[in-house]
Amino acid sequence: ATPAIAAESVPGCKVYYPADTLIDLATAAKDSDCWDSSMVSKQGRTFLGWSEEQIPDITSGAAYTAAQSKIVAQVTMVAPGKTVYAVWAAMPVLNYDVNPPAGAEAPTTPESVTVEFNTPAADSSGWKTGDKTLIPGYTFQGWTDTPNGDDLHDWTKPLTEAETTVHAKWQANKYVVKFDRNADDATGSMGDQSFEYDVEQNLTANAFKRPGWTFVGWNTQADGKGTAYQDKQAVKNLTAEDGGTVTLYAQWKHAPVNLRFDANKGQGSHDPVKGLAYEDIQVPDDVNESFSRAGYLLAGWNTQADGKGKTYHEGDLVRMGATDTTLYAVWTPAVVVMPPTGGEGWLIPVWTLW
């Protein structure tokens, strides 16, 4: 048989082979072959071997499967020669999709990774499962093959597609809101309320009561100098901390009360004087002239109808309690004294002890 020259032989590797000789084709490894991948390369491609027919560059797993039977490691030399064709596959690119929750500020997208065909891609993002710092209010759960799916990417799986995208999976953080009555004399109880970050819900309706006080809302500080919220207000994102606790303190103001006046067997009336619980209300200067009782003089106002409580007079300050306070007219019997010379008489009070 006539020796033949291998067509398109690598420079420095011109070899003559007898016809019908079984030839081991060169590989891309740095071994005893006449060439290796450092001598022949193609931008962005992985050398897979040789074929006796031309195969378009492989860009998918399906194309790779179809081409595998055509990639040969040996050929039999024929006269006057034989040509084998390099088989190339596109080097897969792994892309990262940070996939932020709606309305959330996306973290910086990690750079894509290019690997040799049919080899796994190592995770180069630097993100760690369970990281709570990448997006406020969310915990990173890992990378998935489908957006928002549960199919975590297998980093040991060889890549054969031209492009593969992994998607960040996020879990909204959960936290608890506690309600503090913020007063020793307040009564009632309220259970904790569970929240999920970015999910709005109404605060539990206030169930606390406090004698003489009106509930006016909640605050993140007991002294009311923090963030204020109304009763049953729709809220979200009170904290970004996973498993965190937010305490809301009840805010109170003195309840409105009235200072009332009772004629106590006399006649007349006077409008109540409005004020606040636990504060002072002044007895009006005109209250006495609004009441009368035949044969009696108005001697003051008492917290008891029998006059055995505390007595007040016009202009005095009355310290209010939790509810309305009623003052009762204090009446003193009077006698008519006639002047010696005749004419109209005048009343003189007859003082008695109650």
Image (tube, rainbow, N blue to C red):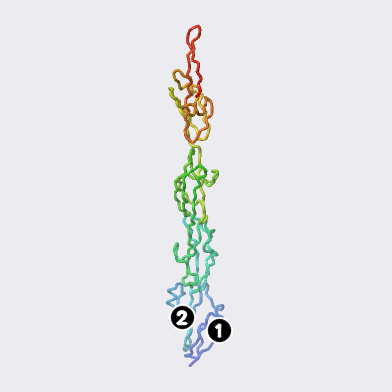
Q: Does 198 sit above or below residue 344?
A: below
- SS label for mark 1: loop
The label on residue 12 is none
Q: Dots 2 and 1: beta carbons under 8 Å?
A: no
Tell me the CA gap for discs 2 and 1.
19 Å
Residue 324 position, x and y percent, is 47, 33
Asked whether 74 or 226 is in front, the reply is: 226
Residue 228 seen in this snapshot? no
Asked whether 159 or 284 is in front, the reply is: 284
Asked whether 160 or 208 is in front, the reply is: 208
| Amino acid of disc 1 | Cys
Q: Which residue is mark 1?
A: 34
Q: Residue at x 48, y 90 (%)?
A: 21
Q: Does 196 sit above or below residue 324?
A: below
Asked whether 88 or 122 is in front, the reply is: 122
Q: Which residue is mark 2?
A: 71
